[in-house]
Amino acid sequence: QGAVREHLGAIADVDATPVEVRLPRDLVDLDALVLPGGESTTMRTLIDAYGLREPIAALARAGTPMLGTCAGMILLAERIADGDAPVFGLVDVEVRRNGYGRQVDSFEADLDVPALGPEPLHGVFIRAPIVVEVGPRAEVLARDPAGRPAAVRQGRVVATAFHPELTGDRRLHRLLAELVAEGTGR
Ligand code: GLN
């Protein structure tokens, strides 16, 4: 689900080779993993139906860089407000699904991203999760216009409330490629 095709294009834009993951065998030999947007409740069900939970958790334990966008951020969060169990629990944040509200299902905003350079990053938020709390193990990479965290990083895992694949700005996909390069010494 989600803007998968755009993520594939963004990965190619940073000179990496995109591979679509549907089944556990598709995870073999991946250098990095993107968890796209979509509907996190459906994705949670499909992750278990297709046996992807344990192999993705194993990639995380091996230090594989990951980027989760929107619903992907929800899958990576350690805490989900209002009772949902965490899925991969890799980033020390609490998120609230659809936290930006029903009436504002969707909006765009320029975000401050000091960690990625002086240029603002254009964020497309589509029924996005709100980050309600960031714990000490996570670092804020970007904030929304109200100052709330909109992108976070914990080690080699990056999560965004917005959809970086829907703009031409490739800094987040490039960060993922850099994390791969750091890890392999390439
Ligand atoms: N609202 C979706 C969810 O809660 C996320 C939307 C998105 O990924 N664009 O899972």
Image (cartoon, rainbow, N blue to C red):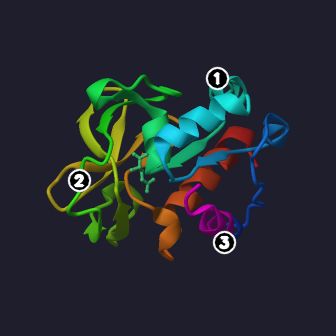
- Circle 3 packing at 10 Å, graded few (<14), some (14-19), many (20+), is some
Name the kind of residue labelled 2 in the image.
Tyr
Magenta: main secondary structure: helix
Q: Position of residue 79 (x, y in %)?
A: 35, 26
In the rendered structure, the answer to whether residue 63 lies left or right of residue 20 reads left
> Whole-Å distance between the Cαs marked 1 and 3?
27 Å
> What crowding class fits label 2: few (fewer than 14 Cα within 10 Å), some (14-19), or many (20 or more)?
some
Q: Which mark is residue 13?
A: 3
* Label located before the other in sequence (1 or 2): 1
62 on left or right of 72: right
In this view, the residue in front, 30 or 39, is: 39
Which residue is labeled 2 in the image?
100
Residue drawn 33% across and 60% down? 113
Local secondary structure at mark 2: loop
Task: Give the residue number, with chain letter if any, for mark 1.
Answer: 61
Residue 87: x and y in percent read 51, 27
Q: Residue at x 79, y 35 (%)?
A: 24
Q: Quick check: 168 above or below 97?
A: below
Q: Look at label 3 and name its amino acid.
A: Asp
Q: Are marks 1 and 2 in contact (CB under 8 Å)?
A: no
Residue at image position (62%, 68%) is 10
Q: Nearer the viewer, residue 141 or 134?
A: 134
- Name the N-terminal-most of marks 1 and 3: 3
Mark 1 residue element: helix
> At 54% from the left edge and 47% from the top edge, which residue is drawn?
67
Residue 76 vertical placement versus 15 (above, below): above
Residue type, mark 1 in image:
Arg
What's the distance in space between the residues labelled 1 and 2, CA to CA? 32 Å
Are the residues flagged by discs 2 and 3 in contact, CB closer than 8 Å? no
Q: Which residues are magenta?
A: 1-10
Q: Disc count in the image?
A: 3
- Relative to 184, 44 lies left or right: left
